[in-house]
Amino acid sequence: MAETNPALGPDLDSPYGGAGNQLAQFGAGCFWSVELAFQRVEGVVKTEVGYTQGHFPNPTYKDVCSGQTGHSEVVRVHFDPAVCSYSTLLAVFWGKHDPTTVNRQVGSL
């Protein structure tokens, strides 16, 4: 199925910016407030939001919200590890994400 569904294929992207930059990806239920938190971290050079792990190619927000595609909303972070460690990114993530709440996002009821 990976041959016909690009969503199941490998991610061949390279980190944005300098040669030493790295990628990290975080899923926190909803990507909007999490993306903003990462954008404010020194050493983060770019953020992107999207969907991962689903079985439906090129889903829309409405498709993913239906709960039928198997996707999770994620933020991909391009960062310079000489300025911002992965541990720092994890601290930001856990500061915005509470897996014990409904839908695994802060403020969900």
Image (spheres, rainbow, N blue to C red):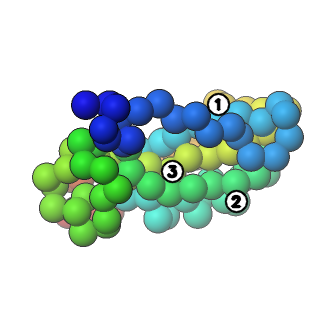
Q: Count the labels in the image.
A: 3
Residue receiving disc 3: 75
Amino acid type for the residue under numbered disc 3: Val
Residue receiving disc 2: 40
x and y, in percent, of residue 90 in the image: 57, 36
Amino acid type for the residue under numbered disc 1: Ser
Q: Is residue 46 left or right of residue 90?
A: right
Going 25% across and 58% down the picture, which residue do you hit? 64
Q: Is mark 1 on a helix, strand or loop?
A: helix
Q: What element carries label 3?
A: strand
Residue receiving disc 1: 87
x and y, in percent, of residue 43 in the image: 79, 46
Please tell me how crowded label 2 is: few (under 14), some (14-19), or many (20+) other residues with Cα within 10 Å.
few
Going 50% across and 57% down the picture, which residue do you hit? 49
Q: What element carries label 2?
A: loop
- First in sequence: mark 1 vs mark 3: 3
